[in-house]
Amino acid sequence: MAVKAELNMDAQATSKGGFGSWGWGMIIFSIFMYCFYAGWGADGLNIFTTAFQRTRGWDPATLLTLVAPGQLLGVIGSGFFGQIIINRGPRFVITSGLVCFAAAVFWFGRVDALWQFAVAFMLINFFGAGFGFIATGTLITTWFPRKKGIALGWATMGFPLSTAAFVPVIALMFGRIGIAGATTVWAGILVLFAVVGFFFIKDKPEQIGCYPDNEPISDDAIKANLQELENYVSPFTVKRLLRDKDMWLIAVGWGCLWMVTLGIVVQLVPRMMSIGYSQSYAIALLSAAAVCALPGSLLWGWLDQKFGTRFASICYGAVYILTLIVLIAQTRNTALTFITIALVGLGLGGIKNLITSMVGTVYGRYDFTAANRIIMPITIIVRTLCFPLMGVTLAILKTLTGAYAVFIVVDILAIILVFATTSRCKGKAF
């Protein structure tokens, strides 16, 4: 094939380590998607349970129990939308998922029965898993297969941004305009992003004349690559993946890391309140943790890019073992509190980066979507076990200390599974 000398101008302008203007656009849009998903599916629980207790008289412990089915429907959503991405691409899932998510959020603010709370939260998690995790991760790894570590480091800043900004904003909105008013505003915001995504998101960089990782390449090579991508059929069938040892190691190992992270985050405000801090101060501490997580997300991305995803993930598990020990020893001591918040914040954005990156590392750009549709549902199942685990522990021991001790054991198991996972690419990388 004759190769033209002309290079794509966007790639040519920023090929020395940059993402390009279009690439940065995908990353920034992904930041918002991760933020919305995390805010409504996890971080908002710090506010939702107390808000519905105040306005509906519902028991927070009962509401936390009803959260688990919602989290599990995210499993179905991740598998369902993972299959749709194979046929329709991430843009379709992002835009259609945002519209449906907006409708679920709108209804969530108007529920007047416990079963309605459960169903609305199930729908939020179902559609959120599609646009806010599966499709977004696919978009980033398709655009940046070699630079996925640092690209995801930027994109997953949306998760700590949710903790830092969404929680105090939603608390303020619930207090000023009520639950129904706040969810109406948010439904409008979500629909607006769906419209922007419809016109702006590109499934593959080749569609607009760019190349993965924003590397310079000829126009002929871009066209040939796009044709190959559109005609590619992954050999990683469901049957083959279910027999693949590394698929299970990634799903369970990184799922355990995520379980520990989620368990810490969703009950950080109650933990701080249990040692004597007010709710407003505890929320401020959660936001401070999220601020620490912004550079933390980039740190994990850098470690991933520099030393590999498996090494970065082992370090991540070790840091959170230390975090859990500090949480167990936590008292109303200013120095210890700030150490705790810094450690919690360090890992907030990292786990979603590392999970997605590891799938890309092992299965490559071409087979990422096929593998991800199976790995993510299993990972979410493992992650969701934090809620029944925490519920049972709290019911028996009446304290979070027991749950933290169990999470240390889970974290050690995760590190063993991560270490056993291959770091070579088994799929088609480029």
Image (cartoon, rainbow, N blue to C red):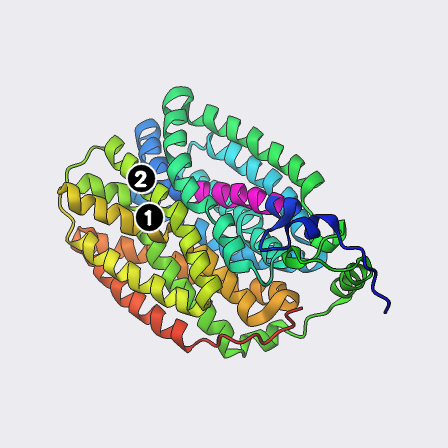
Pick the quarter of the image with the N terminus: bottom right
| Residue that appears at 68% across and 41% down | 200
In-image side of 219 versus 190 (left or right): right
Which image quarter is the C terminus in? bottom right
The stretch of residues the image draws in magenta is 25-41
Q: Main secondary structure of the magenta part?
A: helix
Quarter of the image for residue 169 reads top left
Left or right of 204? Residue 276 is: left
Numbered tag placed on residue 48 in the rendering: none
Instruction: Estimate how packed mark 1 is, as few (under 14), some (14 to 19) or many (20 or more) residues with alpha carbons within 10 Å.
Output: many
Can you tell which mark lies on residue 345?
1
The image shows residue 163 at horizontal and vertical percentages of 38, 41
Is 5 inside the magenta-drawn segment?
Answer: no
Per the model, the C-alpha gap separating discs 1 and 2 is 8 Å
Q: Tell me which residue sits at (50%, 49%) in the image.
A: 154
Asked whether residue 380 is in view, the answer is: no
Q: Position of residue 130 (x, y in %)?
A: 57, 50
The residue that mark 2 highlights is 288
Residue flagged by tag 2: what amino acid is it?
Answer: Ala
Q: Are marks 1 and 2 in contact (CB under 8 Å)?
A: yes
Asked whether 92 or 125 is in front, the reply is: 92
- Mark closer to the chain start, 1 or 2: 2
Q: Position of residue 316 (x, y in %)?
A: 35, 61
Residue 17 left/right relative to 13: left
